[in-house]
Amino acid sequence: MNATTSCRVCRGPVEEFLDLGRQPLSDAFRLPDADDDEFFYDLRVGLCGSCSMVQLMREVPRERMFHADYPYHSSGSRLMREHFEATAERLARTELTGPDPFVVEIGCNDGIMLHALAERGIRHLGVEPSAGVARVAAERGIDVRIDFFEEATALDIAATHGPADVIYAANTICHIPYLDSVFRGVDALLGPGGVFVFEDPYWGDIVEQVSFDQIYDEHFYLFTARSVQAMARRFGFDLVDVAALPVHGGEIRYSLARIGERTPSGAVAALIATERERGLDRSATARRFAARVHRVRDDLVTLLRDLRAQGRRVVGYGATAKSATVANFCGLGPDLITFVSDTTPAKQGRLTPGSHIPVVGPGDFRTARPDYAVLFAWNHAEEIMAQEDGFRAGGGRWIRYVPDVQTV
Ligand code: SAH
Ligand code: TYD
Ligand code: ZN
């Protein structure tokens, strides 16, 4: 268990603290009759002893994850649509107030955020390598470039569109191992006084809630304010603001500006101090987290085996990328979970990656009337439980595993 590698950000020593086993691509939903070999890799995670960046020990080639059939459509959740409309409104009000402002979004997906800026007539460009979701954005009237954001892309955008006032990304910067190239690109594209804003799942929340399912192929980094500050400074930027967001189980929105251009808010130092008190930069904390992950696995597997022994019908709710980590780490298959319900058409009729559980639509969930449903989309609990109020009313029970295993 003492494997080490070198940090993708600072080249310091990364010490492994958790092995989540052999895993498939988290968003590779398979056709039932697929006969190609499924891709697997070892999902292991470590902590950099120098800059405290939490990162995967192994990188999956980006083209395997982000391509024309990438099935994750951001606009599938009402909560997230509202969140990004509020984000757009805020950016328009605070950062995009000059003459003819220009905003670039890295990983715009189906345009969930940019459409609200496009409707305001704000000059924008989404950079999105997954052509299927990019096309959905384009059909909504958003300017999209089907590409990976990196230094060369940024140089080209700067040459054709001029400097950006804001570069924004949600749930995307943590997906990109090659952040040195991204930062060189941001430096080339961002105009003087501009701001680079990104929001991603927060390692502090993951540790607190033992939400180990936030660790999967696409989430190469799990950020803290301290690790983001160290990274920013390495590339000529500074962390000038942080804000906690109540989405995806707890995220932080980081605002970066070139060193010396903006005064960091008190929130930055305060959050970094809290992280130090919590020991988030220490390997002992990481190892304690790993022990709690194993406990959750044991509890969940025990519960599901007991329910099967009692003849209860158990299904899953939400074919999330996160659920691939849970299902494959815990060895869950169709013997324990009959099907998983999900609203995404691109996932329905397919099998979950690695665990090969059929994905069905919510209509099938309602007619099947199962006894228990594992809430894989726990970050959308409120929205889902409201939609499925008939499930509990009819005697069904939810199984949650964040922060611990319980039926509700
Ligand atoms: N911003 C959306 C989408 C997040 S999913 C949201 O918060 O819901 C992550 C997205 O990043 C995917 O659509 C993926 O195709 C895209 N992506 C991955 N690598 C990228 C890169 N190097 N540049 C731009 N987008 C990238
Ligand atoms: P999400 O938790 O946003 O992300 P990830 O795949 O990165 O873990 O995924 C939510 C999934 O749950 C998505 O496939 C859509 C599905 N879903 C439903 O089936 N019903 C719902 O009401 C909501 C909000 C989501
Ligand atoms: Zn490092």
Image (cartoon, rainbow, N blue to C red):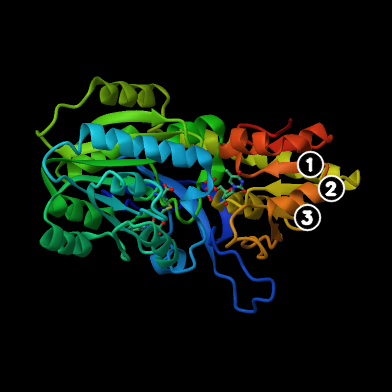
In which quadrant is the C terminus drawn? top right
Q: Nearer the viewer, residue 43 or 252?
A: 252
Residues packed near mark 3 inside 10 Å, few (<14), some (14 to 19) or many (20 plus): some
| Residue ID for mark 3 | 338
Is label 2 within 8 A of ligand 2 (CB to nearest ligand atom)?
Answer: no
Q: Is residue 63 left or right of residue 405?
A: left
Image location of residue 215, percent across then percent down: 50, 47
Q: Which residue is mark 2?
A: 313
- Measure the C-alpha gap from mark 2 to mark 3: 7 Å
- The x and y percentages for residue 201 are 43, 40
Evaluate if marks 2 and 3 touch, with contact meaning CB atoms under 8 Å apart.
yes
Judge by depth and name the residue closer to the eye, 269 or 57.
269
> Residue at coordinates 17% horizontally, 38% vertically from top-left?
257
- Secondary structure under the numbered disc 2 in the rendered image: loop
**Residue located beneath label 1 in the image:** 372
Identified by mark 1, the residue type is: Tyr
Q: Residues within 10 Å of mark 2 (few under 14, many from 20)?
A: some
Picture residue at 19% right of the left edge, 27% below the top: 264
Disc number for residue 275: none
Front residue of 217/241: it is: 241
Q: CA distance from mark 3 to mark 1?
A: 11 Å
Q: CA distance from mark 1 to mark 2?
A: 6 Å
CB under 8 Å between discs 1 and 2: yes
Q: Earlier in the sequence, mark 2 or mark 3?
A: 2
